[in-house]
């Protein structure tokens, strides 16, 4: 019978692999940070080595890591079977697999505007049409392109100056996931400076061309109102043939729909009919020599002589009709001779006027 032999055997403990990761990660490019929580019963965790498989073979060589606390970027939702293999200093290997299913899709930002072009002083209405993906929208972010920001889902906004503005918008959902950034370009346009040109004088029965300055740097259209008595109310400088005094309005509209209005006046100089008799007797009937329309002729002259050829009355312009007096004294009843020069394109008129009492 042989003697017993005792051999000492050392049994080394296995590591206890474990790890954690954030409760929420967001696409796109969800960068998941893993926190190693592995241990070993003999308290020699510092000697452990690690081999990670992130469960994402499509990522290629970065699907594996030997770091203690690695991070991995996921570009899809998953789920992913993440495996951690832990090796002790004695070569004992143990692993664990935990399912990563906390990745959320990226919300999608979008918005509408009621207009792309407006005239300065007019508002835009911006409305978010974003999708919070698997969460609800908790934050709205807008950059208006002029240094201003807004945080509402829908709002009206008026720019202070003309220009081109790029509006940017993104959202954040209740998981803290940020959307893409949606952008639109809007335009704030100036008004044209309408100028209908100078007022005009025109002889009755004639015509006159309206002459506004053509100083519009942008494409514009023209509209004259009323359109009556004009050869072309859509031309900048139409020819007018009104029978009476008239005011025309010129509306200038840019190709962006911004309009401005200016006015001009045409004075129609009618042929003055000259009465050949009046009775300055104080009865209130024909007491003065009223010449219709003559007061509308700037700079006209009226000269009256007696039967001896002496000038007894002269007026430049005819603001006040002659009352049959000279130096406050009634002239004698009789026939007097006149020369009226309307100027402004009309010929002189000559004739006689009888004074009776």
Image (cartoon, rainbow, N blue to C red):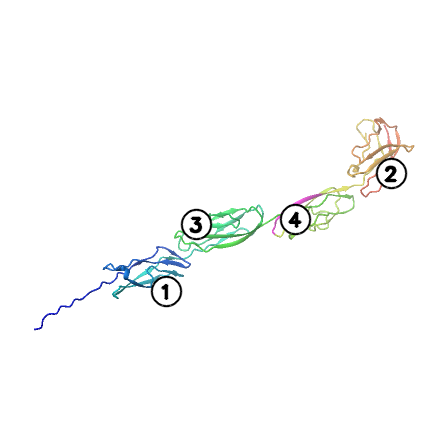
Question: Going from the N terminus, do you reach mark 4 or mark 3 first?
Answer: 3
Question: Going from the N terminus, do you reach mark 4 or mark 1 first?
Answer: 1
Locate the N terminus by quadrant: bottom left
Q: Which residue is mark 2?
A: 350
Residue 266 picture location, percent across and down? 73, 43
In the image, is residue 262 part of the stretch drawn in magenta? yes
Q: Which residue is mark 3?
A: 139
Q: Residue at x 48, y 50 (%)?
A: 142
Looking at the image, residue 245 lies above or below residue 169: above
Q: Nearer the viewer, mark 4 or mark 1?
A: 1
Question: Going from the N terminus, do you reach mark 2 or mark 1 first?
Answer: 1
Q: Measure the alpha-carbon separation of dots 2 and 1.
A: 113 Å
Side of 192 relative to 158 (left or right)? right
Residue 243 picture location, percent across and down? 75, 44
Which range is magenta?
256-264
Q: Measure the alpha-carbon separation of dots 2 and 3.
A: 89 Å
Q: Are marks 4 and 2 in contact (CB under 8 Å)?
A: no
Question: Going from the N terminus, do you reach mark 4 or mark 2 first?
Answer: 4
Q: Measure the alpha-carbon separation of dots 4 and 1.
A: 67 Å
Q: Measure the alpha-carbon separation of dots 4 and 2.
A: 47 Å
Question: Going from the N terminus, do you reach mark 2 or mark 3 first?
Answer: 3
């Amino acid at each position: 019978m042989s003697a017993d032999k005792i051999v000492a055997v050392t049994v080394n403990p296995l590591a206890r692999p474990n790890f954690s990761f954030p409760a929420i990660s967001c696409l796109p490019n969800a960068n998941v940070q893993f926190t190693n929580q592995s241990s070993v019963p003999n308290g020699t965790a510092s000697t452990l080595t690690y081999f990670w498989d992130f469960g994402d073979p499509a990522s290629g060589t970065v699907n594996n890591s030997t770091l203690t606390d690695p991070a991995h970027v996921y570009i899809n939702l998953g789920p992913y079977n993440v495996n951690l293999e832990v090796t002790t200093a004695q070569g004992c290997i143990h692993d664990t697999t935990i399912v990563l299913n906390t990745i959320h899709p990226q919300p999608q930002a979008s918005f509408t505007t009621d207009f792309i072009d407006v005239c300065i002083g007019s508002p835009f209405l911006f409305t978010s049409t974003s999708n919070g993906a698997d969460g609800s929208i908790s934050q709205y972010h807008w950059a208006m392109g002029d240094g201003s920001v807004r945080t509402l889902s829908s709002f009206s906004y008026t720019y202070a100056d003309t220009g081109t503005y790029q509006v940017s918008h993104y959202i954040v959902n209740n998981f803290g996931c940020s959307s893409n950034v949606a952008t639109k370009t809007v335009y704030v346009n100036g008004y044209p400076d309408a100028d209908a040109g100078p007022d005009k004088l025109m002889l009755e029965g004639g015509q006159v061309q309206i002459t506004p300055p053509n100083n519009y740097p942008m494409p514009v259209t023209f509209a004259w109102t009323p359109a009556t008595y004009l050869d072309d109310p859509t031309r900048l400088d139409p020819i007018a043939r009104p029978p009476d005094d008239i005011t025309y309005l010129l509306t200038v509209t840019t190709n962006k729909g911004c309009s401005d209005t200016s006015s001009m006046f045409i004075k129609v100089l009618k042929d003055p009919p000259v009465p050949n008799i009046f009775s300055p007797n104080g009865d209130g009937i024909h007491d003065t020599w009223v010449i219709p329309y003559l007061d509308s002729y700037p700079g006209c002259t009226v000269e009256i002589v007696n039967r001896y050829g002496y000038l007894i009355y002269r007026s430049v312009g005819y603001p006040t009709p002659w009352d049959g007096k000279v130096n406050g004294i009634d002239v004698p009843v009789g026939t007097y001779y006149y020369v009226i020069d309307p100027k402004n394109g009309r010929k002189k008129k000559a004739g006689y006027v009888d004074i009776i009492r």
